[in-house]
Amino acid sequence: MLVFLFLLAVSEAKSFCPLSNQFCISSSTGASDTQLCFTVHSANTGWAAMGVGSKTMTNSDMYMGWKNSTGGITLSNRAGGGYFLPPVNSQQNGILVPLIESQPDWSKLSFSFCRSVIISTNGKSITPLQVFSYASAKTNPTTNVDSISASFSKHSSAGNFKFDFTIVIANQTTNGTNTSGLPTDDQTNSQPLNPTDSTTSDSSSGSSMKTVILAHAVLMFIAWAVAPFIGIFIARYLKGILGHHWFKLHILFMGPIVFGCTLAGFITVNLYFTISDDNKSHAIIGWILIVGTFAQVILGIICDRLFSMERTSIPWWDVLHWWWGRSLMVLGVVNVYLGKELINNLGYDEYSSFNNGFWVMFAIGIAAFGVAEYKIEKVHDGKVHDGAANSKNL
């Protein structure tokens, strides 16, 4: 009877699935208008957690759940701590409640909890425009599963997203008076909700985010695991075979394809993500590649404008263009590798395809350059003979 009365008190849930059929979070109103309830579904059996107010578990208000010795759920409210075991909050803000919505077939771990919308100390308030983090693991906590202080291993899947979970109670604000339990701007120092900054669709939004991530991966794979190998190979080895057409093909691969795909991939992924501890190296290298590729395009234009068929040696700006491009290609390959590992951490099934594709293209590129270096005579435009080029260790 108590379960029935509780379920009557909550409203229709609003859901978001950052990992479709692997991790979902939904919100609903609680028994009072100052309370918000969450239901977490995870395909991992060990533990699952959501973090409020931070892109990573670091500095977040964490709510973790795992199965205890009786087969029920232990809920632990913790302060996110980054690369060490998050400490248990002295004040537990979450209250475990009966499962609010039915457990989907794919979920191995599901639990519901409620908490106040506004938390002034030892926690973070829920706001209309907010970043959430999530994580889960395949292995159970290692000690004392019935205690909120149980120890546990590192997550096997994690990420972050933007969503408005308060939409289920936002309509309770009427006639300019805040009766919904939502914090006001004065209480949270937050900005008013901008619909373009928050995802407002239902569980299909998880598929949208996955599509964005995979689109980013495909664009960057083309930009740095395919196109630069071809563009540099053409410029270094195929001038004598292609004639003046080498230049047009080199521009095509290194301009519209490399720079265009890099820019498109950068814009695409930033629809959802910002730099966090989980993707910091990948994101920083991505910024370097954006700036470096733009500089390389400008340098290529300068080399073209300064080119003379009467030259008898390789000018320093050409040498800089060559080595700058090669350095960017190596850095790009490293970043594609880091990106495919992030896809693996997210638990996407497509990881195996990207992993195999990466190593296949890497092997083909190394083999092609190795064979061409010894089998194809390099041709230099102008009156430059091979000895002059070799004397510069190019």
Image (cartoon, rainbow, N blue to C red):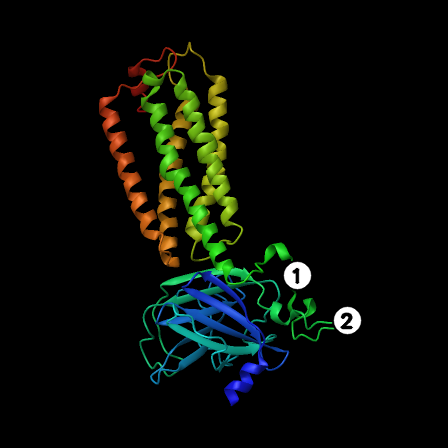
Q: Residue at x 52, y 50 (%)?
A: 270
- How far from the left and from the top, in percent, is residue 122? 54, 76
Position above or below: 345 against 112: above
Position above or below: 108 against 95: above
- How far from the left and from the top, in percent, is residue 276? 47, 56
Q: Which residue is mark 1?
A: 191
Q: Amino acid at mark 2?
A: Asn
Q: Quadrant of the image for the C terminus?
A: top left
Question: How many residues crowd around disc 1 within 10 Å: few (fewer than 14), some, or many (20 or more)?
Answer: few
Asked if residue 148 can be seen in this view, the reply is: no
- Foreground residue, 66 or 43? 43
Question: How many residues crowd around disc 2 within 10 Å: few (fewer than 14), some, or many (20 or more)?
Answer: few
Position above or below: 184 against 327: below
Tally of marks = 2
Q: Which residue is mark 2?
A: 175
Asked if the residues shown at circle 1 and circle 2 are in contact, with their CB atoms under 8 angstroms apart, the answer is no
- As drawn, which residue projects farthest toward the bottom? 1
- Quarter occupied by residue 19: bottom left
Q: CA distance from mark 1 to mark 2?
A: 20 Å
Q: Amino acid at mark 1?
A: Gln
In the image, 178: left or right of 296? right
- How far from the left and from the top, in percent, is residue 324? 41, 32
- Foreground residue, 135 or 9? 9
- How far from the left and from the top, in percent, is residue 332? 39, 40
In the image, 348: left or right of 6? left
Q: Residue at x 45, y 65 (%)?
A: 134
Q: Residue at x 40, y 16 (%)?
A: 244
Q: Looking at the image, tell me whether mark 1 or mark 2 is earlier in sequence order.
A: 2
In the image, 250: left or right of 139? right
- Quarter occupied by residue 107: bottom left
